[in-house]
């Protein structure tokens, strides 16, 4: 195979269709080498030994659906895949894209004419995705390294500032003591920021099994871990119906830890009650944490899920602006989404959709 040649794996059981597709692929100006296999079994055997630049997979094969082959590829980033079908089927297209296909094509003369350009577009799109993932990976590694290396000196700064404050209260003036308090407070804020950045960078890397979770049990564990904050804020937490979900326990804990913690800090006054619940919606579960505080202005409801973006209603409260970004990232890793709605009567209701 010469330099610059695009290696394409074509999974197609019809010899006639395979010949037409091969001819269309080879008619473009980019040199290609097309390997044809006729079943999922042959494709799996081939992929176990070689990695193509692109896989074009027929939806209906003798030994199963082409999307079954995409499940084998899940988590791999070495090559993209396109699914083809003899007829337009919107539901099948959606399932193919969910399974990991970059495109869904209907077999037709028009598609054959456009095949070389489709291949160029798909490969260009895949290259952009791969480059973005590499940047994300490098950023995550950088965040982890910086956070780890800064932790020891930061602990010393906080510790010595607190020691001086305690031992020198009688010999230092008010301005000096105030400076020491600010050093300690700033150090603790930086430590909190590093912890939140680490949480954000490691989302989805947990080794916890993806299995049915008793959501109520996880929420009770979160409430126990936040009991001191809950007591200090003089608020209550009311737990409603919480369906079982199919996610990692670590990620589920992170979601409720962030949302209930935020409700305590930003959404409550003494005597308020935070409501936690959820409902099943088809194959998904929508979980929520509801407060009755100041709420989130409409024009800030998307922004607050971005890292370091803090809403105007929380500007005077201590926080890093990372927690909601982590929640959104977890929701996406779990096949869902995260958003905020207005609580009837005032306040904010944070919703997270995950697999049921």
Image (cartoon, rainbow, N blue to C red):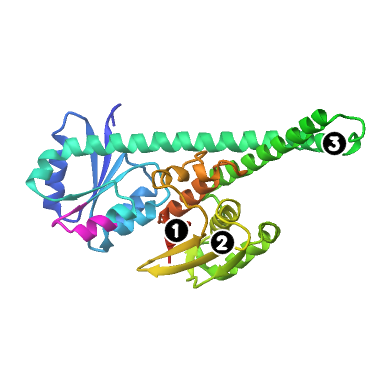
Q: Can you tell which mark lies on residue 61?
A: none
Q: Is residue 30 above or below residue 353?
A: above
Closer-to-camera residue (220/206):
220
Highlighted range, magenta: 84-95
Q: Residue at x 61, y 38 (%)?
A: 144
Residue behind mark 2:
249
Q: Which residue, given by chain and number where applicable, does mark 3 sit on? A: 165
Indicate left or right for 50 with 38 as reference.
right
From the image, tell me which residue sits under label 1. 351
Give the percent coordinates (x, y) of residue 129.
37, 38
The residue located at (41%, 35%) in the rendering is: 132
251 drawn magenta: no
At x 50%, y 42%, the residue is: 312
- Taking the view exactly as shown, the residue that stands out farthest to the left is 109
Task: Name the image quarter holding residue 146.
Answer: top right
- Relative to the observer, which residue lies in front, 256 or 142? 256
**Residue 271: percent from the left, percent from the top?**
62, 63
> Disc 3 to disc 2, how far (Cα)?
41 Å
Instruction: Write the residue at 7% across / 46% down.
Output: 109
Q: Report x, y in % for residue 36.
A: 23, 47
Q: Is residue 191 above or below residue 352?
A: above
Of the numbered discs 2 and 1, the one sitting upstream in the chain is 2
The alpha-carbon separation of the residues under discs 1 and 3 comes to 43 Å
Whether residue 60 is visible: no
């Amino acid at each position: 195979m010469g330099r610059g040649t695009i290696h394409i794996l074509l999974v197609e059981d019809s010899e006639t269709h395979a010949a037409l597709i091969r001819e269309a692929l080879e008619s473009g100006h980019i040199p290609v080498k097309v390997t044809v296999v006729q079943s999922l079994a042959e494709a799996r055997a081939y992929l176990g030994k070689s990695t193509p630049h692109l896989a074009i997979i027929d939806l209906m094969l003798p030994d199963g659906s082409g999307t079954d082959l995409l499940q084998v590829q899940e988590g791999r980033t070495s090559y993209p895949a396109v699914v083809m079908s003899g007829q337009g089927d919107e539901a099948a297209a959606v399932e193919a894209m969910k399974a990991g296909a970059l495109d869904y094509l209907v077999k037709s003369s028009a598609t054959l004419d456009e095949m070389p350009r489709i291949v160029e577009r798909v490969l260009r799109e895949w290259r952009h995705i791969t480059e973005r993932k590499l940047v994300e990976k490098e950023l995550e590694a950088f965040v982890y390294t910086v956070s780890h290396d800064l932790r020891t000196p930061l602990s010393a700064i906080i510790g010595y500032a607190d020691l001086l404050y305690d031992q020198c209260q009688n010999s230092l003036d008010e301005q000096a003591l105030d400076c020491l308090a600010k050093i300690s407070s700033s150090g603790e804020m930086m430590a909190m920021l590093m912890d939140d950045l680490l949480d954000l960078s490691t989302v989805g890397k947990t080794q916890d099994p993806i299995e049915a979770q008793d959501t109520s049990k996880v929420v009770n564990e979160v409430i126990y871990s936040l009991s001191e904050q809950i007591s200090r804020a003089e608020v209550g937490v009311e737990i409603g119906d919480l369906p079982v979900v199919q996610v990692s326990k670590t990620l589920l804990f992170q979601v409720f830890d962030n949302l209930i913690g935020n409700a305590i800090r930003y959404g409550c006054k003494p005597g308020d009650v935070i409501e936690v619940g959820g409902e099943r919606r088809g194959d998904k579960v929508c979980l929520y944490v509801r407060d009755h505080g100041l709420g989130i202005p409409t024009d800030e409801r998307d922004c607050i899920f971005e890292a370091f973006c803090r809403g105007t209603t929380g500007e005077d409260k201590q926080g890093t602006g990372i927690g909601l970004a982590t929640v959104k990232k977890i929701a996406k890793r779990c096949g869902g989404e995260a958003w905020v709605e207005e609580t009837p009567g005032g306040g904010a209701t944070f919703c997270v959709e995950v697999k049921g």
